[in-house]
Amino acid sequence: MLSTYISYQLIAKDIPKSIARIEQQPTVDRDTQYYLANITKVKSIDDFVNNDRLFKYAMKAYGLENMDYAKAFMVKALKEGVSNPDSFANKLTDKRYAQFVRAFNFAADGADATVYNPAQQLVTKNYAMQAEIAGLDPDSDYVKGETTYYLANITKVKSVDDLMSNDRLYTYALAAFGLDSATEDKDLIRQVLEGGVRDPDSVANKQTNKAYAGLASALNFEQYGANATTYVPAQQPTVDMYMRQTLEEDAGKTNEGVRLALYFQRKAPDITSWYDVLADTALASVVRTALGLPDSFATADIDKQAQLFEQKLDIKDFIDPDKLTKFLTRFTSMYEINHPTSTAVTSVSVLFAQPTSVGISTDLMMAMQQLKF
């Protein structure tokens, strides 16, 4: 059996290729085809939870497969949505529930929850509202005609250039947010769309008029690229998450350390505080193992755990690919020490670039404990 480090590296060095192998598994392929063919037919929470095959697929995609039996619990979360900070999902410590509800947002989007894309439904809804404000009947032939054209063509738009080169689509999109294409500076609009809204200092976010941020959020090319006008959380993104979950699950059948490393790698960019780590038993386990801390440390005062993690590690390193790789190298090597595989090769040698040998010397153990990030 390969060491934890090597097994992890074989998967992590080419995640798309690793996932492609998962996609080819007959059961996975059948379940995915069924999901994509039927999820758009779901128009209510009852439709969703009463279709076991769809519901279980979705729950697994968000790492909640162990709760797919708790339908009443999930119905409550779905009904309350995530718009209210005090909603059921938002008050749960585990952020996966809020993420799930946000993807299947029946509370906000109703029957459109499984087909909702901001560049489509949000823009056309806003356009009708803006038309009414300007004194036009939302049901007039003109408004209907422009909306029909917009919906028929917006999904073909794959970039900011595509949008701006089609005057009719461009005018419609801006009008939906109360912006006049005839007077707006095109260079500014381009900067707004290209910069997106994830960065607080983006051009859109720095404008006094919130309409710019609204436009950039609905036509979010910065975040979703060519998929901005077709991105629907309940469809392909959920499938992508299902594949990643299955990849990690399969890895865990052979080596739980590999599953933990892959999970940490996926979650790392979203970690903003040590309390995020401590709220997730898997993430916390990875950090404890990397630092050589015993499992019993998990019973210590939560604030003291956070303080120690902060002293030993810089949380910002988790968004740096190279530093994250170094951290996970340490984790997989420490995990191998604590849970040795049958291979004669120890992963400690990976860190020290020394010839591999059977067993681990006391000197190497001490050096491992003292290794700095």
Image (cartoon, rainbow, N blue to C red):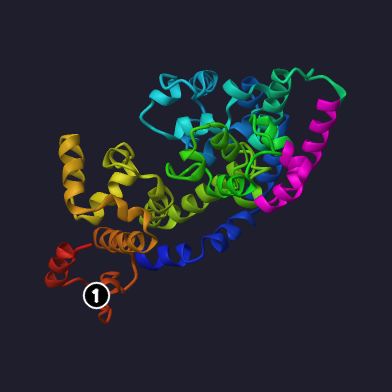
Please identify the residue farthest to the front as the structure is shown: 183
- Residue at screen point 78% across, 19% down: 136
Please identify the residue farthest to the right as the structure is shown: 141
In the picture, measured across the screen, residue 25 lies left or right of residue 355, that is: right
- Residue at screen point 68% across, 43% down: 230
- Name the quadrant of the C terminus: bottom left
Report whether residue 27 is seen: no
In this rendered view, identify the residue nearer to me: 252 or 118.
Answer: 118
Magenta-drawn segment: 142-171
- Name the quadrant of the N terminus: bottom left
In this rendered view, identify the residue nearer to me: 80 or 331.
Answer: 80
Looking at the image, residue 347 lies above or below residue 15:
below
Residue holding disc 1: 352
* Residue 145 located within the stretch drawn in magenta: yes
- Residue at screen point 42% across, 22% down: 85
Classify 10 Å Cα crowding around label 1: few (below 14), some (14-19), many (20 and above): few
Report whether residue 121 is seen: yes
Residue 118: quadrant of the picture: top right
- Image coordinates of residue 328 in percent, x first then y, are 33, 60
Q: Amino acid at mark 1?
A: Phe
